[in-house]
Image (cartoon, rainbow, N blue to C red):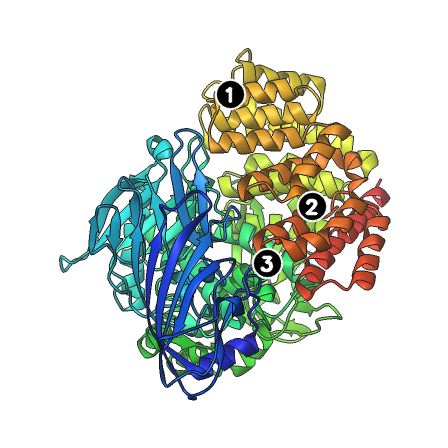
Amino acid sequence: MAGNLTRDEARERARLLTVESYTVDLDVTTGEEGFGSTTVIRFGCAEAGASTFADLHGATVREATLNGKALDPSSYDAEKGRLPLPDLAAENELRVVADCTYSRSGEGLHRFVDPVDGGVYLYSQFETADAHRMFTCFDQPDLKSTFEFTVKAPADWEVVTNEAPASAEGGTWRFPPTPRMSTYITALVAGPYHVVRDEYRREDGSVIPLGVFCRASLAEHLDAGAIVDVTRRGFGYFEKVFGREYPFGKYDQLFVPEFNAGAMENAGAVTFLEDYVFRSRVTDAAYERRAETILHEMAHMWFGDLVTMRWWDDLWLNESFATYMSVLCMAEATDWTSVWTTFANLEKAWAYRQDQLPSTHPIAADIPDIRAVEVNFDGITYAKGASVLKQLVAYVGLDNFLEGVRRYFDRHAWGNTVLTDLLGALEEMSGRDLAAWSKEWLETAGVNTMRPEYELDGDGNFSSFAVLQEAKADYPTLRSHRLAIGLYDRTPEGVVRRERVELDVVGARTEVPQLVGEKRPDLVLVNDDDLTYAKIRLDEHSQATLVESIGDIRESLPRALCWSAAWDMTRDAEMPTRDYVRLVAKGIRGVTDIAVTQTLLRQARLALQQYADPAWRGEGQALLADTLADLARGAEPGSDLQLAYTQAFAGSAVSDDHLAFIQGLLDGSQVLDGLTVDTDLRWTLLRRLVVTGKAGEAEIDAEHERDRTAAGERHAAACKAAIPSAEAKAAAWDRIVSGDLPNAVFRATLGGFVEPDQADLLVPYVDRYFAEVGRVWREWSSDMSQTFAEVAYPFLVIEQSTVDRTESYISEEKPPPALTRLLSEGRDGVARALRARAKDAASA
């Protein structure tokens, strides 16, 4: 991995240095393995004679001079990524000439060769601290500077950095200096990219130039018009609510190959996972997710790029804010007006899961070094933080919140901040004292649970009503919540809300006198409208309504909250898994929100695979598959629901009849009216046949021949790893641990290897995992080693011996804290599954 900078080292370097400018010359014409990188840094030092170091990872230093004096190249440590800088002056100039290495792991400057046409594509990915894989720098967020890039590239390439080019002649692209920014949001993207250019025009006639890029072989699938439409809506909304224009000169969005994340907020040059260029039919949920990602990265242009956290302790400020603002923008400025339903069902489920792991942490986390932050891009940093911001908005009011944000931008533009800078601006605008709020919500870990408690009089009316708040013993904080309670009745029009009360809930018990005298409804929904961040439980009467009538709840958000409660109760071993699966099988017909539908179907399959009593699993799989087959046949031809049902059916089918139907869809002998069996759906169908032993290498190779693309290569790798034989698993394992696979193929192979329906074949790999994980963590890059530690963990071998083996490894080997965290999370997942299986078995 690149150098593991500590917070203390960063603070000391920031105390000493003021960085004035970078001039970076890159030559990407030197060969397939590496590129030339020449960097000149001009910087001041507060203490003449002091020493520090510059960051540069995995390079060969040809020449290094500091203030005109040659530095000894042998003093450079390529593995640690550090070049010592002794005896600094008040004003300094460092020049480093180096040969750097292309990445195949998605970190630094990544190089990809398109199997379709042989085109070579480059892109950078620098968060959290990988800029020093491409050029010499002080790679920490609070040492901002200007960056002036010159890039020598093949004459037929597009070259993109943070600024529009000043000139591009003879393959040499010269870019003007950027505004002051952090190293991690600088960017280089280069290659024979296809580009569509457009603009966002403001009412005063000024424009933001827009570019949408993808590989040439994907150009036919690029729906640039839809991407630009979301982009324009975002700029119109954010410039208005933030009170200041977009801070950079142009806005390029680049869909790049083998990207590890969803997207990255490089200033003016946002990179995206190219799976967002849809080459096959997808449901509207995928378009909604892409829009949220586009708007999330755009929000970062102000919150993260213009104003940046001082250190990674406040990473959540970047990510939570961008998540909250992207959903708010979608709800108010796009056609996805029910996006808060998706947020409740998807984002908050992620947060609740993360917050119940042994590695849970406060939103404002303690980040001692870079390796610690790299495992902190999690459901707390993103989804819990955004949920808490939603709660804060309910507390201070949206207008006050946005006015405080505008004041924050005005004060800190182009600078670095800490949490108290934002809270101070919000306090000024709202008049609220946020110190106690911050302590409760940002500086403590864990999630509260809310339950209604009531008594009835002889007429069936509430004679008392209270909300009970609970907390786990390990994280005992009882927080102050602003929430709503909804009373829902069964009617001929469905289950509809009769009454809503909004109040502050504080402490273990909060009386609700407003509901005394109200007739008991069929459903009491605590946290109606999803105002706060808390798990909810239903009283017995309401739970019966949920089981019988969840599909009849008319509004999407309360229905999603009920589904979320049922799923959480299943994960907590309070509801038998078979009851949850039956609930989905019965109630899914009433769900019309496609994002919720697909989430529920994923959760039902996960429940069967991990939480169901093995003695009942076969019956449950048959129930789910039968239900999905009927739904797929009966769905509106060509609809999103038809596609979602078919995809889920293809992941659930077990009987010979069901598998024959899948084979028929694949070979064309079976037809569902309106369903197009396109490239990606073909792979989905084939994979199920492979997993169940109905197809093998010959069929995989034939399908790969039809799809000789990068995506086809990944699908084929996943399918071969999912062949249900010991030999196939052994071959896949050898490829996985070799360290030779590029990141995207590595992930695909690993995904096929850990096929949930093949847990028995994975038992021998428990010991093999623990034999390899320490070496992988030491030797591999950060992203690749983290992926191995998480995904290869034997989470499907749901036995007490897996828990015991993990605990003994942690005790005996004493792995680094970040790896210990990932191992403890895996162990917790197995222990949770064991508890859920016991609950399910007891219900028989």
Mark 3: few, some, or many residues within 10 Å (few <14, many ≥20)? many
Q: Are marks 1 and 2 in contact (CB under 8 Å)?
A: no
- The quarter of the rendered structure image containing the C terminus is top right
Front-lying residue, 49 or 731: 49
Q: Which residue is mark 1?
A: 705
Q: Between disc 2 and disc 3, whose residue precedes?
A: 3
In the picture provided, is 760 more to the left or to the right than 144? Answer: right
Check if mark 3's residue and mark 1's residue have beta carbons within 8 Å: no
The answer to which of 46 and 682 lies nearer the viewer is: 46
Name the N-terminal-most of marks 3 and 1.
3
Residue 98 visible here: yes
Residue 478 left/right relative to 106:
right
Three-letter code for the amino acid on which mark 3 is drawn: Ala
267 is higher (above) or lower (below) than 748: below
Look at the numbered disc 1 and give the secondary structure of its residue: helix
Would you say 182 lies left or right of 163 here? right
Q: Amino acid at mark 1?
A: Glu
* Residue highlighted by disc 2: 792
Instruction: In the rendered view, tell whether residue 694 sits above or below residue 414.
Output: above
Question: For the point 52% across and 13% down, which residue is it?
Answer: 668
Q: Residues within 10 Å of mark 2 (few under 14, many from 20)?
A: many
Residue position marked by numbered label 3 in the rendering: 351
